Amino acid sequence: MTSEAVRITAGGAAGALYAGQTLRQLLPPEAFRSVAVPGVRWSIPCGRVEDSPRFPWRGAHLDVARHFMPKREVLRMIDLLAAHKLNRLHLHLVDDQGWRVESRAYPLLHEVGSHRAQTTTKPYRDGPEGFDGKPHGGYYTLADLAEIAAYARARAVTVVPEIDVPGHASAIVAAYPHLGADRSTPVEVLDRWGISPVILSPLPETVDFLATVFSEVIEALGSVPYFHIGGDECVLDDWAASEEITAYQRSLGLDAPAGLHAWFLRRLADVLAEHGSRAVVWDEAFVSGRLREDTIVMPWRGMPVGRRAVAAGHDIVATPVFPLYFDYAEAASSEEPLAIGDTTTLDDVLAFETVPESLTPEEAPRVLGAQFQLWTERIPDGRALDYRAWPRGCALAQLTWSGDADGFTAALPAHLARLDAYGVEYRPLAGPHPWQRGGTGLRAHHPGEVKVRDIMRHVEELTHDADSTRPSLT
């Protein structure tokens, strides 16, 4: 920048876009408003800025299955990701509580699976059972999905769709019962949170069904370098109880349902590879058995399992519950709105080391980056989404772009002024505004009932237990 002009030199379109975001940040906060407002002097200090991202994967995960987020919220999230130089939007499109994308080949998926009759009001696992009696639902048409993807590409954001299988399948089985492993009990779209035992059959018919649905999603998105297939929290009891599935498992030379689980996901990864897409999975899929070598693992249960995935030759994206699950409250306070538990603070995010020190120089590049997770059981709308995502998302953006947290805290107030101008209803550093508080009703938060560090200890123990009995595949 000189007194005469601003010059941008970039290695590509994305670099030029990021340079533009840097330039925008050098302008007054009003540069983040939708239109220029009178009385603001637009000036930029002279200087030279030269930088590049630390990681290729800098992302956010948005669960639109538990609570559906209308297209406008998804487009707005893309804008906010781009403003923070984040470049991945992981869309969790399917879960027990809803199927969120049109299917022309299997229309009952969106006609039946996209809505539930009511939603639980039970705040925690041990709280009183209750339901709101209000239908909830929604889905994106394939045209919507194409629009979202094109909008994202124009802002250097890659959409990573997730069809979570073979567990978390209540919405699928409600629409097409013959795809379930247990066909004796009717299934409805789930109206409560937690892990459901409903699971898809791993038989060839299910693989063919999913291959068709994957093709529809990929065609709509236009270009899908990464496709998430879940693989997490699968209850395999119905597989073990089925004579047909057990016989199929044995025909493949597998001696346990866990091996069949890994085989099933590897088969789906092969299907995706035919479309030029790399499969992405949650860490249970890695723990259960051998995957395709190019499968990316997301170690949500902690970086120790991430280190094991790297050692096995997989690329990983850091996604640990602590400190990157932003559905946890930022303070152990009854003033906070309802959250799954507490506490994950802004400082916790800033202190996160994305690349474990124990990795060798050869292994470290397998850490592609990190993303924060917004699970929406307790995030019912866009205002709550803003509150949970920012400013913790700003901290993750800093870590994945520069890797340097120094100076972030001092610079944050100026950045929050930009978010104010943008209209983001973030969580203030001093605590929630009066209208953001949980109050004493159904949105009341009960601090201390679920602690994120206790959860992390538990899930890390589970990964160690599973790893000790991990099957081999032939």
Image: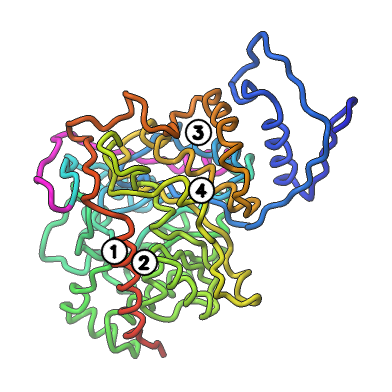
196 over 237 or under it: above or below? above
62 over 249 or under it: above or below? above
Residue identified by numbered label 3: 76
Q: Position of residue 73 (x, y in %)?
A: 44, 34
Q: Is residue 141 magenta?
A: yes
Residue identified by numbered label 1: 167
For marks 2 and 3, give the CA distance: 29 Å
Mark closest to the chain's N terminus, 3 or 4: 3
For marks 1 and 4, give the CA distance: 22 Å
Mark closest to the chain's N terminus, 2 or 1: 1
Mark closest to the chain's N terminus, 4 or 2: 4
Q: Which quarter of the picture shows residue 422? A: top right
In terms of depth relative to the viewer, which is nearer, 443 or 380? 443
Q: Are marks 1 and 3 in contact (CB under 8 Å)?
A: no
Q: Position of residue 268 (x, y in %)?
A: 43, 69
Q: Secondary structure at mark 3?
A: helix
For marks 4 and 2, give the CA distance: 19 Å
- Kind of residue at disc 4: Leu
Direction from residue 459 to residue 26 in the image, left or right = right
Residue identified by numbered label 2: 231
Q: Position of residue 71 (x, y in %)?
A: 44, 35
Q: Secondary structure at mark 1?
A: loop
Q: Secondary structure at mark 2?
A: loop
User: Is disc 1 surrounded by few (<14), some (14 to 19) or many (20+) residues within 10 Å?
Assistant: many
- Kind of residue at disc 3: Arg
Q: Are marks 2 and 1 in contact (CB under 8 Å)?
A: yes
Direction from residue 220 to residue 56 in the image, left or right = right
- Kind of residue at disc 2: Gly
Quadrant where the image shows the C terminus: bottom left
